[in-house]
Each structure stands twice: as C-alpha cells, then as structure tokens.
Image (tube, helix red, strand yellow):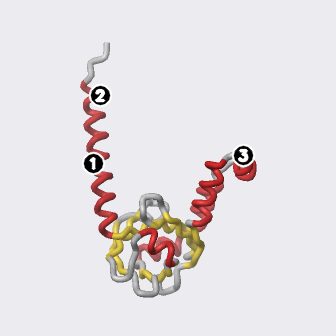
Amino acid sequence: MLAFCGQDYCQIDANGRVKLSPRVISDFMEKCSGEIVMHCLPEGALAIYPENIYLDMRRQEEAPATRAASSMVFRRELRRFGALSSADRITAQGRLTIPHGFREYAGLLPGTEIVVVGVEIGVELWNAERWNAELMKMNEHAIARGESEMADDLIIKD
C-alpha cells in the first residue's frame, strides 16, 4: 500500500490542533509509532515527517561541525532547520498540536481550511489558498517542461 499519498482536508481549532484522517494516522503509526517532526518549509507550508525520516534527511550532512565553523551559509541553514523544526507525537485520537509560530508561518489559522498533502515521505499541511496557488505553479512548470522537452525532441541533430 502506498503511504503518505493523496490529499485530505481538515480544520485547525482555536488551540492549534488538527485531526488527521485515519489513513494518515495509520501511515504515521506504521512508519514511526506517531513520533514526528514538524518543519516549516520555505514555500509557506508545514511538513510533518516521521522522526526517523527527518533524522535521515539531516544525517546527509557531512562533517556538520566543521562546515558550521567555516560557513555562514551552512550556519544559516542549521538555524533555519533548528528554529523551524519541532518534535512531537500524534495522539491516539490522531490529533496534533501545531506550535503558534508555526501556525502563523504557514497561515494555518483557526477556522481556515487546511489541505493535508501526501509527499511520499510524510505530509504537508497547507492553507487551502496557498495550496491552490502552489498546485497552479506546479502544473504550469510541468507543462512548460513538457513543451520544452517536446521542442528539444523536434530539433534535427546533425
């Protein structure tokens, strides 16, 4: 069975809690027993990854202490990940409390419609308006790439 695929909709309550769908809860329980990491994405959404997936992503950095000592860009990346990530656990009822600053960052305000988007390694929580804009950008990009690929295919090569 495919994990972390598809789209669901939910709402956020006044206390910053979201209730995930049974399918998404099942994926997280199977992959990580509900231990997750939330991370604010530059695109304006909130990623939720199984903790082990997040740790694998971060382990890809070679010699982080050495790089941090010599690279301002790398230190900024560490700050971004450190400040904009938080570990938590999905409750037995499938609820997750989003930290206040993360809610503001991603536009996940009480009463707003939230789209839960599967990204194969976890899910992303999007403000519905932002998701529609992102979906339009992704589709426009895919069409432009396809047209470019077709144009390249038509070029006669000597």
The residue sitting at 33% across, 78% down in the picture is: 112
Residue 24 vs residue 63: left or right?
Answer: left
Residue 156 spot, x, y in % from top left: 27, 18
Residue neighbourhood size for the residue with mark 2, other residues' Cα within 10 Å, grouped as few (<14), some (14–19), many (≥20)? few
Question: Which image quadrant for residue 76?
Answer: bottom right
Cα–Cα span, label 1 and label 3: 39 Å
User: Which label lies toward us, 3 or 2?
Assistant: 3
Q: Earlier in the sequence, mark 1 or mark 3?
A: 3
| Within-10-Å neighbours for mark 3: few <14, some 14–19, many 20+ | few
Q: Which comes before the other along the chain, label 3 or label 2?
A: 3
Q: Position of residue 40 (x, y in %)?
A: 50, 65
> Real-space Cα distance between discs 3 and 2?
42 Å
Q: Amino acid at mark 3?
A: Ser
Dot 1 alpha-carbon crowd within 10 angstroms: few under 14, some 14 to 19, many 20 or more: few
The residue drawn where x is 27% and y is 48% is 140
Tell us which disc is closer to us: 1 or 3.
3
SS at mark 2 in the image? helix
Quickly name the residue at label 3.
Answer: 70
Task: Kindly identify the amino acid type of the residue bearing the numbered disc 2.
Answer: Asp
Residue 1 seen anywhere in this rendered image of the structure? no
Q: Which mark is residue 152?
A: 2
Mark toward the viewer: 2 or 1: 1
Identify the residue at horizontal 51%, vertical 85% (top origin): 92
Q: Residue furthest front?
A: 72
The residue most toward the top is 158
> Residue flagged by tag 1: what amino acid is it?
Glu
- What residue is drawn where x is 52% and y is 84%? 91
Distance CA(mark 2)–CA(mark 1):
18 Å
Q: Which residue is mark 1?
A: 140
Task: Tell whether 100 sits left or right of 157.
Answer: right
Q: How many marks?
A: 3
